[in-house]
Amino acid sequence: MFKLSRKTVINFVLLVCAVFLISAFSPFFKNSAQKTFQSHLSLIGLLKRECAGIIFYHRNMVEFARLNNETENLRRRIFDLREVEQENTRLKGLLSFKQKSSLRLVAARVIARSPDSWSSSVIIDKGRYNGIRPGMAVINTQGLVGRVMESAEGSSKILLVNDPSQGISSIVQRSRQEGLVNGSLGPNLIMRYLPVDAQIAAGDIIITSELSQVYPKGLLVGKVINIGKEFSGLSRYAVVKPAADLSGIEEVLVIIP
Amino acid sequence: MKKWLSIFFVLILLTTLQLSWPVSLSFFNTKPDFLLIFVVSLVFYFNFKIALILAILAGLLKDAFLPSGMAMNTILFSVWSYLTFRLSSQISTENNYVRLGIILIIAVLNNTVLGVQNLNSGNYIPAGIFLRNLLISSVYTGAVSPLIFKLTKKISA
């Protein structure tokens, strides 16, 4: 049925070579494509947000009342904690601790999502112009979101924590047990390479470890929801629910080191 | 000239739709592949050379927004375009159900290649999620394909 002539095969091989050449120059194409789509993707994002605001008016109203109540409680707690903070500063000074510099953050909006189901990434509306470079960690108010993969002039591509190519060196906050958190394209992450006698249980908090060269130490990754044994029986794994809601992510903060 | 403008407009529209597909319309975290449907439908309604050029362009556009560096979609789209052309010269593809079947098969093959390539690069994907992406995404692609076929038919007229 598919008898291919020599000419057809040669033409096709030439075409594949041409595609590989194009992919070699793809950073130029990628930047141009992202730049072309950036403006109207931002506009569509804005329209989607406005429409969702109108459609979910009642839900938003209830949420607003709940958040207002929570804000009042938090305001009271801040007042109490300010006192503790001052005490902490005084004690640190007494112990001659080096003051750790606070993180510098750049806020950005998500304007597009991964075009296929085999990767988990988003595109944000800030790029090199705003000081964003590949390899920088990305968080939101809930926890770790991912890292910057590529940055164009006015936009950047973020690889989310649930992408399978992600590997985050992490620890269990309670027991300091180390492991590697991988994405699985699903809603949960998998913490692997845990010894059989690892001190880990459901409900434990997972944070980034200081061994990670990309992510600053102590960023909240998620919570353990289940523990299992690897097929080989040599190690265990933990299913981790990410702290950040990755499917509904709208705003992120890029950490500028 | 008007036809080319319409084609580029549809290409940009479908890429935008692919990038900003609402989460509420995603089934099990999967979304339809509008660009793949467009690439195949171009073979049915346009000259093969035009279809092939647009398949490469659509693949490049899709790859531009993906995290992987390799132009996998560019190659795959051109291969599917060529194979559809060969197939349409052997069997009748006038019937809408036949077209739907072709899209479904191509979507499954496309997802299989992308999934295997993902596994081959050392990434860990649980079997359930692999099958979910393979089957649900392909069926979803097939389900929305009649709309894109109608659109392509309209711009080809």
Image: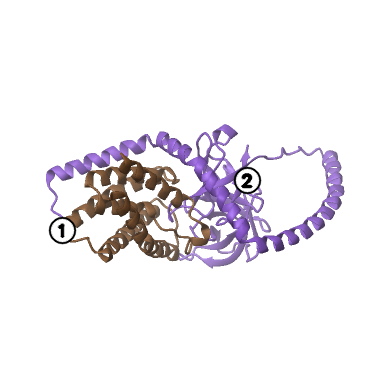
A35 vs B122, nearest the viewer: A35
Q: Using the rendered view, name the quadrant where residue A138 is placed.
A: top right
Q: Which residue is mark 1?
A: B90
A83 vs B99, nearest the viewer: B99
Q: Position of residue A10 (x, y in %)?
A: 17, 41
Q: Which residue is mark 2?
A: A210
Q: Which color has been applied to chain B in this rendered view?
A: brown
| Residue drawn at 56 percent across, 50 percent down | A47
Q: Position of residue B60 (x, y in %)?
A: 36, 43
Crowding near the residue tagged with mark 1, few <14, some 14–19, many ≥20 C-alpha atoms within 10 Å: few
Crowding near the residue tagged with mark 2, few <14, some 14–19, many ≥20 C-alpha atoms within 10 Å: some
Left or right of A131: which side holds B77? Answer: left
| Residue drawn at 41 percent across, 50 percent down | B14
Left or right of B43: which side holds B121? Answer: right
Check disc 1 and give the amino acid type. Answer: Gln
Q: Secondary structure at mark 1?
A: helix
Quarter the N terminus of chain A occupies = bottom left
Quarter the C terminus of chain A occupies = top right
Q: Nearer the viewer's eye, disc 2 or disc 1?
A: 1
Same chain for marks 2 and 1? no
Q: Point out which mark residue A136 bears.
A: none
A233 vs B81, nearest the viewer: B81
Which chain, by letter, is purple? A
| Residue drawn at 22 percent across, 47 percent down | B48
Check disc 2 and give the amino acid type. Answer: Glu
Cα separation, mark 2 vs mark 1, equals 61 Å
Q: Position of residue B142 (x, y in %)?
A: 35, 62
